[in-house]
Amino acid sequence: MTAFKAFALIPAAGMGKRMGASINKQYLQLGGRPILAHTLSVFEQSPDIDGICLVIPADEISFCREQVVEAGGFRKVIEIVPGGRERQNSVMNGLKALKRVMSPDDVVLIHDGVRPLISPTLLRESIAVAREHDGALVAVPAKDTIKTVCNGVVTDTPDRETLWQAQTPQAFRFNVIYQAHCSAEEAGFSGTDDSSLVERCNGQVRIVKGDYRNIKITTPEDLILAEAFLSAARQETT
């Protein structure tokens, strides 16, 4: 039997303007450590992950390597590459770097650097689904009624039963996501996430039911919520 591998691609090249902080959000403290360090820890400790590629703003690579990767002892980080103009460009930079070490059928999990509360169980489930299908998308059912709005006027109320909120990781066999990114790049297509690029190529992406605690830390309110979730998790294990 072929021994498939799984690698994590973690884009953390965003500027975090909505956070209003003096440093980029991935370096803000959460429970005494940078947010990015919490995220890396989950992948570092998972026996299902063989390596990690970090995508960081070019001028922060040295800082990130010293203050996060080396300081945290993250030995699975095999690549730190510069980000691009947009997230999609950053992911493509990471995929090009991973192409040197990944086989076409290996699985890559693309995960936001500022989603530190992802569980090892979701990593394992995502890998299993991605090996059998075109992709795996961690998502949760929408809790609220969603409105379609144009110029401030409600134009439609979609059936909430069909609506899911996309999270990460989004997992794919390497050749599937690499070809989807190449196709989008050639066509000048910009997707809202990596799954949308595979969908554009008629790929079938399967849902892996996620966790409402798997939040993306974007605003100061998100950081407060993440602190509460982290504190609760620590209490559960003591």
Image (cartoon, helix red, strand yellow):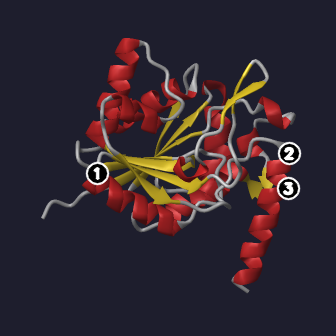
Q: Which mark sits nearer the N-terminus, 1 or 3?
A: 1
Pick the residue in front: 79 or 145: 145
- What's the mark number on residue 198? none
Q: CA distance from mark 1 to mark 3?
A: 37 Å
Q: Amino acid at mark 2?
A: Pro
- SS class of the residue under badge 2? helix
Q: Which residue is mark 2?
A: 220
Residue 85 locus on image (x, y percent): 58, 19
> What is the crowding at mark 3: few (fewer than 14 residues within 10 Å), some, or many (at least 20)?
few
- Kindly tell me whether residue 76 is visible in this rendering: yes
Left or right: residue 223 compared with residue 176: right
> What is the crowding at mark 2: few (fewer than 14 residues within 10 Å), some, or many (at least 20)?
some
Quick check: marks 3 and 2 in contact, CB under 8 Å?
yes
Q: Which residue is mark 3?
A: 224
Q: Is residue 195 above or below residue 234?
A: above
Q: Amino acid at mark 3?
A: Ile
Q: Amino acid at mark 1?
A: His
Is label 1 or label 3 in front? 1
Instruction: Identify the residue at image location x=77%, y=74%.
Output: 232
